[in-house]
């Protein structure tokens, strides 16, 4: 075998090992999930997207985490100077390639706040890493789904 043949074989072996590892990985359990911390503004439970400069906040229906397969009402608030008419939500279940996507139109704009009302229905329990975007605002959150 030539050095080139050995190098090609090693690359192929590494690629197949990585692919096999991805196919056999397990989802992160809700117990092992490190979700974005819920904060409170008065009586409202909220999540602040990372980075905070994104101005994306999620007003939650309470402190309890979302349940798989059940609508979870979230009111998204974004600086209206950054927002567009549509908010895009894409989440990936940790440890898998499973994706969940939603798009919602603006519910209202009041001064500098654009509001988007969404009913998120996560398809399975686990830890979901989400990217939220609208206009020039882009932020990330992690949800523990039970």
Image (spheres, helix red, strand yellow):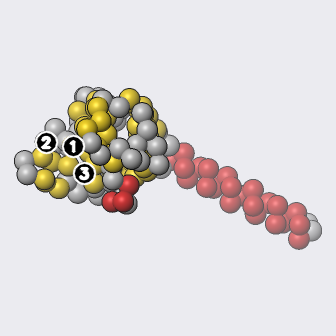
Residue at screen point 42% across, 33% down: 85
On the question of residue 14 being in view, the answer is yes
Q: Quadrant of residue 13?
A: bottom right
Is 46 or 111 nearer to us in this picture?
111
Is 51 or 108 nearer to us in this picture?
108
Q: Which mark is residue 47?
A: 3
Classify 10 Å Cα crowding around label 1: few (below 14), some (14-19), many (20 and above). Answer: many
Question: Upstream in the sequence, badge 1 or badge 3?
Answer: 3
Q: Is residue 111 above or below residue 48?
A: above
Residue at screen point 7% across, 47% down: 43
Residue at screen point 33% across, 48% down: 79
Q: Is residue 93 above or below residue 105?
A: below
The residue wearing badge 1 is 59
* Rendered-image quadrant of the N terminus: bottom right
Q: Is residue 45 above or below residue 102?
A: below
Residue 86 appears at what percent x and percent y? 42, 33
Is 23 or 66 nearer to us in this picture?
66
Question: Upstream in the sequence, badge 3 or badge 2?
Answer: 3
């Amino acid at each position: 075998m030539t050095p080139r043949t050995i190098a090609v074989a090693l690359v192929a072996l590494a690629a197949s090992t990585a692919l096999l590892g991805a196919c056999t990985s397990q989802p992160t359990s809700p117990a092992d999930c490190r979700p974005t911390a819920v904060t409170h503004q008065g009586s409202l439970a909220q999540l602040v997207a990372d980075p905070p400069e994104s101005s994306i906040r999620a007003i939650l229906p309470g402190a309890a985490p979302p349940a798989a397969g059940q609508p979870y009402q979230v009111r998204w608030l974004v600086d209206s100077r950054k927002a567009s008419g549509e908010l895009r939500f894409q989440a990936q279940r940790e440890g898998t390639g499973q994706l969940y996507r939603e798009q919602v139109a603006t519910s209202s704009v009041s001064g500098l706040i654009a509001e988007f009302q969404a009913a998120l229905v996560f398809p399975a329990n686990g830890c979901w890493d989400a990217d939220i975007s609208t206009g020039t605002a882009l932020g990330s959150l992690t949800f523990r789904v039970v």
